[in-house]
Image (spheres, rainbow, N blue to C red):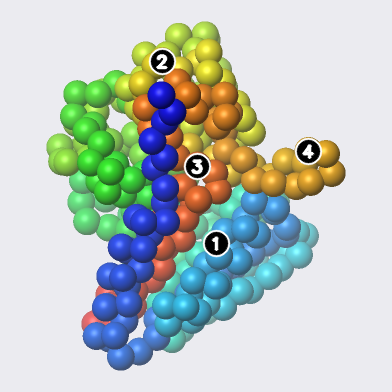
Amino acid sequence: MSAILLKGKQVAKAIYKQIDVEIEELGENPKLVIVVIGEDSASKFYINNLIKKGAKHKIDVELLKFPADVEEVEILNLIAKLNDDKSVSGIMLQKPFPKHINDDKITSIISPDKDVDGFHPQNIGKLVLGKDGFVPCTPAAVLEVLKFYKIETSGKDIVIVGRSNIVGKPLANLLLRKDSTGNGTITICHSKTKDLAAYTKKADILIAAIGRANFIKENMIKKDCIIIDVGINLIEKNNVQKYVGDVDYQGCFDTAKMITPVPGGIGTITTSLLLKNVVRAFKINSK
């Protein structure tokens, strides 16, 4: 029996419908500014989709690109200006940064009320404490899939492969919450985990967010598990480039009960949630 596909398009469609209603009520277009430093193939896909979807749903998206060797002070000054600019609803910093740019320093000076990515220490603190704030969009997208497809998490063994500040850590905290997409028993695995397959084989729900193409193989999962693939990796095969996830999709398809495709899964929903956060930021900053 083949796996049920957990497609992101239907989930995102419902979110965009809500966005359209809210913007119609606002009577004004929110504005998102995306700051990009250097080049990253995976991020291009995400950014282009944001620009395209923003235009479709009446959200102005401005892209500010800088070379990889830009001075850190220039980015700090830019963020300060964007914080003070009342026409800017939300600020997004596309990561990863070049090594000479201090990630923590840049992120911490963004106004928490314009931090639509949800990475400001204040928003992360609220997430951990279960308070209301901006939640990082990729972990939030995982929760949207769980809600939309009515996937039970309470008491389930949930294994997250990847411990990044962007996905793994915030997602673990969200899945621990005492709510409809929480109450899971969470295990986080990473590059130093010994005998990784011993953990992944126990997972009722396996979430792959390690950033390595086709890393999770069929012999690493148990039958009828639910796989959520957060990864998006650009690979080349037979002189053709394509995006694949962190899971060997073809290899795992017949063993898993449910699985997200790449592309067309979590990334599709992430875009809609980022734009939803922009609308929310507009409302906060208009008060």
* Front: mark 2 or 1: 2
Could you tell me which residue is drawn at 75 percent across and 47 percent down?
Answer: 241
CA distance separating discs 3 and 1:
26 Å
Q: Say which element carries label 4.
A: strand
Residue 163 in sight here:
no
Q: Amino acid at mark 3?
A: Pro
Instruction: Find numbered disc 2 in the image and state the secondary structure of the residue it sits on.
Output: loop
State the residue position of label 3.
261
Q: Which residue is mark 1?
A: 93
Q: Is residue 26 visible?
A: yes
CA–CA distance between discs 3 and 4?
A: 19 Å
Within-10-Å neighbours for mark 2: few <14, some 14–19, many 20+: many
Image quarter of the N terminus: top left
In primary-sequence order, the first of circles 3 and 1 is 1
Tell me if label 2 and label 4 are in contact, CB under 8 Å.
Answer: no
Q: Quick check: 210 above or below 220?
A: below
The amino acid on which the numbered mark 2 sits, given as a three-letter code, is: Lys
On residue 222, the disc is 2
Q: Which residue is mark 4?
A: 237
Within the image, what quadrant is residue 169 found in? Answer: top left
Callout 3: SS: loop
- Of the numbered discs 2 and 4, the one sitting upstream in the chain is 2
Q: In the picture, which quadrant includes the C terminus?
A: bottom left
